[in-house]
Image (spheres, helix red, strand yellow):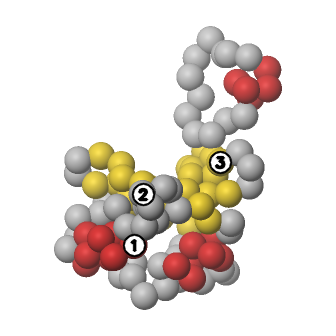
Amino acid sequence: MNLNALAQHVDAGEIEELEVLSLEGGFYVLRAITATGPVTLSDAQGQPVRLRSTTELRDLLADMAEVPCVLVQQSVHDEMCGQRDFPIAPLRVPITLASQW
């Protein structure tokens, strides 16, 4: 889904939530949650759009209608220390797209 399609889906009320996935390497990927499942925001070449900060995300979505948004951070424990006996849910922190503060 590109930015124009995302805006159309937001305006139509088809986006339940936006997830900002924090990934290794210090960048973020935006994923829209729809009734049919998650869809990643892609560029003109079909590659995931890589964002450097939540400020860049706010600038990108500044003209879009407001949608609930969460920052998703996976646990690094399993990568660093091995598997646990039980799954660890990712950290999900609500963020606002309206302003930084």
Q: CA distance from mark 1 to mark 3?
A: 20 Å
On screen, residue 85 above or below 78: above
Q: Secondary structure at mark 1?
A: helix
Q: Is residue 8 left or right of residue 31?
A: left
Q: Is residue 27 left or right of residue 37?
A: right
Q: Amino acid at mark 3?
A: Leu
Q: Earlier in the sequence, mark 1 or mark 3?
A: 1
Q: Earlier in the sequence, mark 2 or mark 3?
A: 3
Q: Depth check: 69 or 9 in front?
A: 9
> Residue tagged by mark 3?
23
Residue 62 image position (x, y, % from top left): 49, 85
> Residue tagged by mark 1?
3
Q: Callout 1 environment at 10 Å: few (<14), some (14 to 19), or many (20+)? A: some
Query: Toward which corner of the image does residue 90 lie, by quadrant?
Result: top right
Q: Is residue 46 left or right of residue 74?
A: left
Q: Depth check: 89 or 24 in front?
A: 24
Q: CA distance from mark 1 to mark 2?
A: 12 Å
Residue 46, which numbered label? 2
Residue 40 image position (x, y, % from top left): 42, 54
Task: Name the residue at 68% across, 66% down.
Answer: 52
